Image (tube, coloured by chain):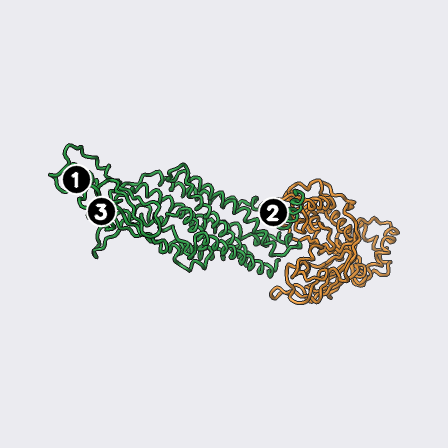
């Protein structure tokens, strides 16, 4: 059997591996390869410093419901008075025989509790601080949302439209913990932001810009292409096997970068256990998207190099188009169909699908965060805006929905196929041009 | 290292026999233009077997001819066949071709052995076979002892030999060498010439380009002279020489007493004129170069003068072209 395997391997291990291996070794001897890689890692580490700094800074707690204030000036915080049944607005009415609580006790005292929401209407929410139960006397006062359950929250989940509506009884879940929410949302926003923009776009475009554009062009201008083209091997094969060598260096690099970032953020991010295992799926999808995107860009840029000796100019113009597409895709959160006309748009669908699988509660977290800071002030029209919790807005910007009208897994598979198809098309066009190119 | 002056290849000597009745190389009225420049103008050639020298000045179209053969550029008109196949459309004939490009640039970071193994594998050889081949061809060009050194450390002549070795893997039937002697020192030239002669003796079809007639004559008698994109002369170098012999020539002699020598030389019938150039030099003019050369040694001995050198100052490609084109170069 091993003999047979040897035979199969030696059959395969000819032209393709010869060129791929040669290309890899050639990269290793070039200083530009190392410069690009070191520069990418340094840039990512710099951004990572900001992340670590943010994760280690406590987010200032906000008293969303005003329970820590002492409106009547009797020394007791409003929350304590509500709990003990005295009037927080009357200086004469205060609890007797009880020491006043420090105001800090009445900040973040009623956090949001809606884990495991299901599609449709959910009755959730717990009155952690007891102000709903103790302050209000009648059943109807305790059931302002009129669902027959006192002191709860109605959450309507509509995952088809990705919307959540919340109707709460007075005094329930009204003072969430900014630090807890902000760290979680900030952590996810960081992963999606650096993943989509830093790795899938920037790394995905800079690696091929420096490593793939000259893959054939440099050989042509140095005259060494003659050695390769004087062999019984078609030019299409040369291009394909050169790309194999290119993958051989870029893919392990992308994987290593993603693994490194996954480990660092997994251990330093907010977690109940030691490591954030739920992030692994997201990092895997980021790595996969970046690998595919860099392959497509690489093939296109290599083709640009064949077309014109200054192919890098074409590559930069193309990169500008893709940058625009990256912004469109990120800012519309998957609602734009112009992203289908790009490479990066499909890459980001992979990340969004991975995030939706790894963090199934992500969009709910966003919905909570966008209104969880409570009511703001009325504007001149009499409308009341919700105040977002810290981290909610960045998370909402960098999150998106695959929005292909299919399940997340299928969206993942479809965009993978589209990217591979784009790569094959780029190779086909590139080799057609290469075949018609006169090499002097 | 010292090249082996009496170069004898250790490659298996196998007589090549054409299995089909097609010439190895066939050019049928091939023209190639770059913009408004005519690089080749209606060239027709058929070459099979033996060593052929492609002679021409810079820009005569030698490299274009080779690029067309190697499918690097597309002919503007006409047809090219390599073993009966159009090389621009199909790289298949290259399994039987070894090409030594003119470009000096090589992969300096590779060892000679690695370089040849890598490119042998493009012939479809396995890693093991490729290593065997690499050792064989490097031994053939007598670089076996330095084959694990980086090409970047090699001298010009050694690099040229690595290029030749790389073209010899897979035992090609056709070997094309573009200016293989350019820039090499005399020792390396001799070695390379011996390698080329040996390949010819092995029955391979070998094409060598050069702009120096003398060099080509030391390798082969069969020459093609290219000039301004056209085939100017084609055939045996002796025949071409014969034609040249009918044309005014100069012979330069260096001797201790030119005036005394002149007295003897004037007795040769074919000598049409003489002049004294600088100190110790006698210039003889003749229309029958061959005949004068035949009688000259005897005349010199009889005169008793000491001659240190005999030279044909304008017997180079330039003057041949001058003659063949009627002085239009």
Kindly identify which residue carries mark 1.
Answer: A85
Structural distance between the alpha carbons of marks 1 and 2: 81 Å
Q: Quadrant of the N terminus of chain A?
A: top right
Q: Kindly report which numbered mark, 2 or 3, lies closer to the viewer in this rendering.
A: 3
Residue A340's quadrant in the figure? bottom left
Q: Residues within 10 Å of mark 2 (few under 14, many from 20)?
A: many
Q: Which chain is green?
A: A
Q: Nearer the viewer, residue A22 or B325?
A: A22
Q: Position of residue B201 (x, y in %)?
A: 79, 52
- Drawn side of residue B176 relative to residue A308, left or right: right
Q: Determine the residue positioned at 64% across, 66% down.
A: B76
**Both marks 1 and 3 on one chain:** yes
**Both marks 1 and 2 on one chain:** yes
Secondary structure of the residue carrying numbered label 3? loop
Q: Quadrant of the C terminus of chain A?
A: bottom right
**Both marks 2 and 3 on one chain:** yes
Q: Determine the residue positioned at 87% across, 49% down.
A: B304
Secondary structure of the residue carrying numbered label 2? helix
Q: Position of residue B282 (x, y in %)?
A: 79, 54
- Drawn side of residue A27 relative to residue B172, left or right: left
Between discs 1 and 3, the one toward the N terminus: 1
Kindly identify which residue carries mark 3.
Answer: A170
Q: Residues within 10 Å of mark 3 (few under 14, many from 20)?
A: many
Tint applied to chain B in the drawing: orange
Secondary structure of the residue carrying numbered label 1? loop
Q: Position of residue A362 (x, y in %)?
A: 37, 48
């Amino acid at each position: 059997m091993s003999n047979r395997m040897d035979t199969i391997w030696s059959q395969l291990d000819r032209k393709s591996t010869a060129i791929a291996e040669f290309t890899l070794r050639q990269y290793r001897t070039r200083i530009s390869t190392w410069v690009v890689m070191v520069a990418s890692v340094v840039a990512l580490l710099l951004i990572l410093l900001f992340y670590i700094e943010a994760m280690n800074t406590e987010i200032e707690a906000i008293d969303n419901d005003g329970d820590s204030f002492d409106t009547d000036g009797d020394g007791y915080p409003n929350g304590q008075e509500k709990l003990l049944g005295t009037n927080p607005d009357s200086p004469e009415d205060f609890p007797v025989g009880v020491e006043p609580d420090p105001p800090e006790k009445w900040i973040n005292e009623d956090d949001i509790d809606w884990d495991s929401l299901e599609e449709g209407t959910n009755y959730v929410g717990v009155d952690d601080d007891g102000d709903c139960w103790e302050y209000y006397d009648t059943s109807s006062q305790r059931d302002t949302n009129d669902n027959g359950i006192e002191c709860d929250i109605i959450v309507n989940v509509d995952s088809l439209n990705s919307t959540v509506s919340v109707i709460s009884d007075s005094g329930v879940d009204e003072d969430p913990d900014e630090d807890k929410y902000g760290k979680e949302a900030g952590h996810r926003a960081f992963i999606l932001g650096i993943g989509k923009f830093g790795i899938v776009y920037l790394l995905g475009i800079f690696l091929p810009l420096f490593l793939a554009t000259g893959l054939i062009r440099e050989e042509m201008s140095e005259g060494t292409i003659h050695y390769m083209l004087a062999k019984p091997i078609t030019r299409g094969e040369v291009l394909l096997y050169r790309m194999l060598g290119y993958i051989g260096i870029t893919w392990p690099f992308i994987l290593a970068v993603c693994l490194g970032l996954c480990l660092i953020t997994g251990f330093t991010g907010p977690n109940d256990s030691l490591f954030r295992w739920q992030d692994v799926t997201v990092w895997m999808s980021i790595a996969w998207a970046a690998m595919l995107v860099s392959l497509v860009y690489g093939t296109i840029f290599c083709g640009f190099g064949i077309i014109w000796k200054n192919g890098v100019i074409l590559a930069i113009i193309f990169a500008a188009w893709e940058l625009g597409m990256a912004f469109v895709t990120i800012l519309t959160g998957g609602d734009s169909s112009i992203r289908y006309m790009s490479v990066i748009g499909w890459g980001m669908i992979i990340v969004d699908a991975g995030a939706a699988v790894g963090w199934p509660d992500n969009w709910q977290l966003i919905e909570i965060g966008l209104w969880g800071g409570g009511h703001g002030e009325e504007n001149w029209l009499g409308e009341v805006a919700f105040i977002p919790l810290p981290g909610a807005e960045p998370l909402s910007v960098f999150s998106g929905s695959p929005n292909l009208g299919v399940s997340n897994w299928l969206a993942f598979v479809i965009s993978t196929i589209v990217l591979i198809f784009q790569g094959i098309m780029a190779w086909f066009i590139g080799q057609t041009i290469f075949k018609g190119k006169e090499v002097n | 290292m010292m090249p082996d002056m009496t170069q004898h290849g250790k490659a298996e000597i196998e007589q090549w026999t054409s299995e089909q009745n097609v010439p190895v190389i066939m050019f049928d009225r091939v023209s190639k233009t770059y913009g408004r420049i005519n690089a080749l103008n209606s060239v027709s050639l058929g070459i099979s077997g033996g060593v052929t020298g492609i002679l021409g000045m810079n820009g005569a179209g030698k490299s274009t001819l080779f690029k067309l053969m190697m499918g690097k550029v597309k002919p503007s008109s006409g047809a090219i066949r390599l073993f009966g196949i159009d090389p621009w459309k199909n790289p298949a004939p290259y399994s039987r071709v070894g090409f030594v490009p003119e470009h000096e640039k090589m992969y300096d970071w590779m060892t000679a052995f690695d370089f040849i193994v890598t490119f042998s594998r493009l012939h479809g050889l396995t890693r093991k076979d490729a290593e065997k081949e690499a050792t064989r061809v490097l031994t053939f060009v007598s670089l076996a002892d330095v084959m694990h050194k980086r090409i970047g450390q090699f001298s010009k002549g050694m690099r040229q030999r690595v290029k030749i070795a790389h073209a010899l893997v897979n035992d090609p039937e056709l070997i094309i060498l573009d200016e293989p002697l350019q820039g090499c020192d005399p020792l390396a030239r001799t070695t390379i010439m011996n390698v080329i002669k040996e390949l010819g003796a092995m029955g391979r079809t070998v094409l060598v380009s050069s702009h120096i007639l003398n060099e080509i004559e030391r390798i082969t008698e069969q020459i093609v002279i290219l000039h301004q994109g056209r085939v100017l002369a084609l055939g045996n170098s002796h025949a071409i020489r014969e034609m040249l012999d009918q044309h005014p020539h100069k012979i330069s002699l260096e001797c201790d007493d030119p005036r005394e020598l002149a007295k003897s030389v004037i007795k040769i019938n074919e000598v049409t004129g003489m002049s004294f150039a600088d100190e110790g030099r006698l210039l003889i003019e003749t229309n029958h170069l061959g005949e004068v050369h035949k009688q000259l040694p005897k005349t010199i001995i009889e005169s008793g003068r000491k001659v240190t050198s005999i030279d044909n100052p304008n017997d180079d490609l330039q003057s041949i072209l001058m003659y063949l084109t009627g002085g239009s170069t």
